[in-house]
Image (tube, rainbow, N blue to C red):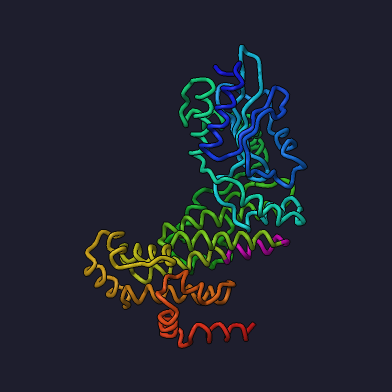
Amino acid sequence: MFIRNPDNLKIICKLMYETFHIPVFLLNEKGLIILEYSSNYSHNPLYLSKEALIGKLFDPSDSCEYPVFKETNYMENFFSVSLVEKEQFKGCILIGPSVYNHLSEEMIKGIVNDLHTAGKRNELIQYYKSLPVVNHLKFTNASILLYYMIYNMKLDTTTVFQKNEQLEKERVKIKNVDVAVSERREHASFHHDPLFEKELFQKVKEGKKEEIISPSILNPNNGEYGVLSKGSNLRNKKNIAIITIAIATRAAIEGGLNPETSYTLSDLYIQNLEEINEVIKVDSLLKDALYDFTERVYDLKHQNYSRTVINCKDYIFKHLYNDITLSDLSNVVAMNPSYLSTLFKKETNIHISEFIQREKIHEAKKLIIYSNYSLTEIYTLLNFYDQSYFTKIFKKFTGKTPKQFKNSHEHMD
């Protein structure tokens, strides 16, 4: 144990900062900062100071038996290791903030909207861009390393996960489930039959779009939907719709729909759902979403593509901004390039190279209409050799040059 020697703690803090590039704070038993490694760190503008943030995270009652994970309302991640010697709390080492993934501007805008802090939007965007991105596993391993350097005790990731999950469960307590079930029995108010859900999502998975049109598609024969929000019927309806869309997304993927298309479609419907202020419109949007997923699966199934061709199309979809070759695709599906080329042409009536060109041009059209990229930036992003080649291929599929296409849509606007 090195707590008696401040120099050892200083070395540990310095090593942690230089290894993981996450701010490191050594706090005394009162939560005051006595040592800090955070050269490029600027505190969250929603707090008056970094001391104000640290004050919210500091907790002398934290266990010293494992690192404790902490997350703020602003998606910042921290962990701390309490410093205890002879059963006396001496302070802690707090490491953070970091984020598990890069936060898009849309996610940051969501945080701003939730907190009604639109005046600090630009400051927040810059703040989040400055935060180190450390995935969950690396973050956990960093906490284990810190604990080992302080206490010379080896912990495993499973133990640390479980201890922190248990801690979270203690913080969030729900009503006893047996009592809740008894209350439902007393009032003869039961949830819908699970078979209703299974049949609904099976229709999505199989692309049975005619059956999804039914006006009663969202009405279970027996039982009722659960209550996911006590305070608002609108919020309750939205929560149920969100869950339904999320499960329909998975069903569509199982039915063969491209995962990225499915997830993006889900995002868009849920974003639109949150803008609705009338209960009756929630069901209408949900029916549209279910039909959309089902119809896309239906269209895909009626193309009768083999799994090999579907995998090729998925790869092209995900790597459209790369230089895709027949060799790349043959490696993905483990098939002879010549045989793959023949198979693809047979099933789709288009050569692989031409299909890739068509998809790139389709993407270029969307970028021209919806983005602020210049034509030069667009052909570079999509890996065309030069502008003249891009223009030639673009005209082949659209009948217009990129400039003519752009001008025609600007005129429409």
Q: Residue at x 46, y 84 (%)?
A: 398
Q: Is residue 125 above or below residue 74?
A: below
Decide whether the magenta segment is chiefly helix, strand or loop: helix
Camera-nearest residue between 24 and 282? 24
- Count of labels in the image: 0
Which image quadrant for residue 3? top right
Residue span colored magenta: 277-288
* Residue 22 counted in the magenta span: no
Camera-nearest residue between 383 and 310? 383
Quarter of the picture holding the C terminus: bottom right
* Residue 283 counted in the magenta span: yes
Q: Is residue 285 left or right of residue 213?
A: right
Q: Is residue 137 left or right of residue 286?
A: left
Q: Is residue 100 left or right of residue 315?
A: right
Q: Is residue 160 above or below residue 334?
A: above
- x, y percent for residue 390: 43, 79
Could one spot residue 173 in this view of the protein?
no
Q: Residue at x 60, y 40 (%)?
A: 77
